[in-house]
Amino acid sequence: MAQQRTLSLIKPDGIEKGLIGKIVARFEEQGLKPVAMKLVRLGLPQAEAFYGVHRERPFFKSLCQYMTSGPILAMVLEGENAVAKNREIMGATDPAKAAAGTIRKDFATNVEQNSVHGSDSVENAAIEIAFFFNAFEIQAYEWKKAR
Ligand code: CMP
């Protein structure tokens, strides 16, 4: 299976509930290594751009307001099959439908305030990683490969 990178966000409800450590531990314990991290607060234009694909959805305005309501933790996760693995660890978008033992089942409030975001494809992962991180910010482990 291929090594991949994916973007993970801990959303405002996850930060508010004090879940950074617990959520990162789940990724690490299940084979996804954080290779870049930052705590940021999105402005409305940034949230609208990040979720642009959902612009026509009825929940778009509320989603963008929620995503700007507090800080979020952006992470690049790396590992085997990282895109699908991250989505498996997160669970279904709606916590009521998420499998037992997933982040959303255990921690999410509702379908909007669902604690985490993860890229849905390798292509979108590259776009979403570039939205939050520049090359310098994701080079921390590069020395290993260069040796
Ligand atoms: P995420 O995986 O970040 O992708 C889009 C987000 O929109 C999703 O998680 C939820 O936060 C939100 N979302 C998706 N469906 C709904 C819905 N039916 N009602 C409200 N918010 C939603």
Image: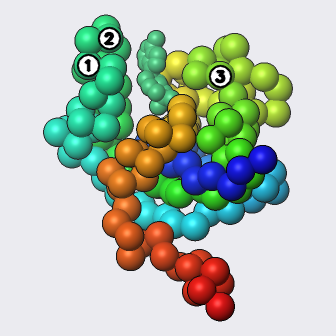
On residue 92, the disc is 3
- Give the distance between the C-alpha atoms of the residues marked 2 and 1, in whole angstroms: 6 Å
Look at the numbered disc 1 and say if its residue's Cβ is closer than 8 Å to ligand 1. no
Q: Where is residue 111? Give x, y as percent.
A: 53, 19
Q: Is residue 64 left or right of residue 107?
A: left
Asked if the residue at tag 3 contacts the one at tag 2, i.e. Cβ–Cβ closer than 8 Å, the answer is no
Q: Is residue 10 visible?
A: no
Which is nearer the N-term, disc 2 or disc 3?
2
Q: Where is residue 20? Give x, y as percent.
A: 60, 55
In the picture of the structure, the residue carrying the numbered disc 2 is 57
Relative to 57, residue 65 above or below: below
- Kindly identify the residue that appears in the image at 62 percent across and 41 percent down: 83
Residue most extreme to the top: 58
Q: Is residue 28 left or right of residue 93?
A: right
Other-residue count near label 1 (Cα within 10 Å), few / some / many at <14 / 14–19 / ≥20: few
- Front one among 33 and 79: 79
Q: Amino acid at mark 2?
A: Arg
- Kindly identify the residue that appears in the image at 20 percent across and 38 percent down: 44
**Secondary structure under badge 1?**
loop
- Kindly identify the residue that appears in the image at 65 percent across and 84 percent down: 144
